Amino acid sequence: MTLGDAMSEDEIGRRLYECIADLYPLCRSLTGEGLRETLRRLQRVVPLTLHEVATGTPVFDWIVPKEWNIRDAWVKNARGARVIDFQRSNLHVVSYSIPVRRRMSLAELRPHLHTLPDRPEWIPYRASFYNETWGFCLSQRELDAMADGEYEVCIDASLEVGSLTYGEYYLPGESTSEILISCHVCHPSLANDNLSGIAVAAALGRHLSGLSRRHSYRFLFLPGTIGPIVWLARNEALVPRIQHGLVLVCLGDSGPLTYKKSRRGDAVIDRAAAHVLKYAGDHAVEEFSPYGYAERQYCSPGFNLPVGRLSRTPHGRFPEYHTSADNLDFVRPEHLAGSFKACLATLDVLENDRTYINMNPKGEPQLGKYGLYADIGVDEMAMLWVLNLSDGRYSLLDIAERAGLRFEAIRAAADRLREHSLLKEVP
């Protein structure tokens, strides 16, 4: 079986970009209606099950926070003009800001204003999830234009007992062993971080649903940090099923594909991703660190799951990160399509990695007798490598790595050898 995509690369990129464009205007956060609406729209792509976890629920060392919802926010000058306006950009408000309604001088307001002096046209993204405060974000240019005087400040928001929402999509396969695909859904209008990962994950779910699958797949759409902790706390009994995993983020920019290894460092997912990227052109493979996205929860020592992270330019390494410049112009359909294909190729390795025994191991089989000598479309060296290393100890991925050949060439050779009963799969 192959997971190869029937759509053209242009069509894949267009659909992924359209998904991002649809979700981009929504004000997502750790909890709340913006997050729920995001998940509801994703249900048009894959049939997500939405889970609600009540405020105050203990999850390991954490507690599910209050639910935050925002309706409007502004700063008005003495003439009543909105000089900062949530309706123009949802980045203008520090996420999880408490409700505010007051008048204050610019001097009093300044400690609550956040800018990027070195990027004077951009609005930063800021959040204060676990510290009840408030603030606004704006460009340095906008701040410089604010005159001394009195301002009316309003954040029409609520921070109350409610629930945390996450989405889950389970695809059963021939085996109960699972491949986990995870992305974070808690950022407002940021296209690369995090909408690119969301769009690619949803598209993978939709594509895989139409194929036969050796593994089962679990797709998780979770708010950052607390989300994977909530899922792990509620599903400890399922955790041993997870044999491979990928966290998807920052997949729409022009940077090279970058894979961050799992905590184990030598898990099959680490090797499969590195093998695929080796043949994908410019790329990077990085060692694990306990900083980043959901992978640091899945790879915490109490679980130590084989979960790596795939991105293009990693977070914090592109100037647009967590700013208004991470917009719909920053992500491109062709880069999204390339990321999707790399994910699919990695999953294809996991689906088709098998171990065989050579049924005619004493000397080389006479390939011509089986019609395999100079077989068009099959790499002769790949066949020789498969025959030589298929002693029940080496998987096809092992052989591809040792031979320095693409996995698909090794797999194609193994398929042909099986057809002629020269190989037998090890259960």
Image (cartoon, rainbow, N blue to C red):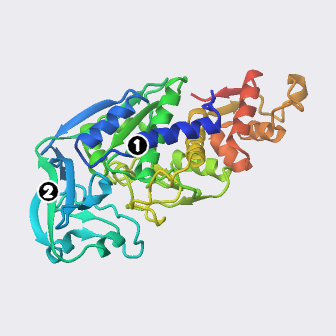
Residue 380 drawn above or below residue 1:
below
**What secondary structure is found at the residue carrying circle 2?**
loop
146 to the left or right of 247: left
Foreground of the two, 367 or 53: 53
Q: Quadrant of the N terminus?
A: top right
| Position in image of residue 98 (x %, y %) | 14, 56
Q: Residue at x 49, y 25 (%)?
A: 209
Residue 363 drawn above or below residue 56:
above
Badge number at residue 6 = none
Q: Earlier in the sequence, mark 2 or mark 1?
A: 2
**What secondary structure is found at the residue carrying circle 1?**
strand
**Which residue is labeled 1 in the image?**
182
Foreground of the two, 221 or 194: 194
- Identity of the amino acid at label 1? Ser
Residue 366 drawn above or below residue 163:
above
**Which residue is labeled 2 in the image?**
98
Foreground of the two, 355 or 382: 382
Q: Is residue 171 visible?
A: yes
Q: Crowding at label 1, few (<14), some or many (≥20) Cα neighbours within 10 Å? A: many
| Position in image of residue 163 (x %, y %) | 17, 40
Q: Crowding at label 2, few (<14), some or many (≥20) Cα neighbours within 10 Å? A: many
Residue 392 figure quarter? top right
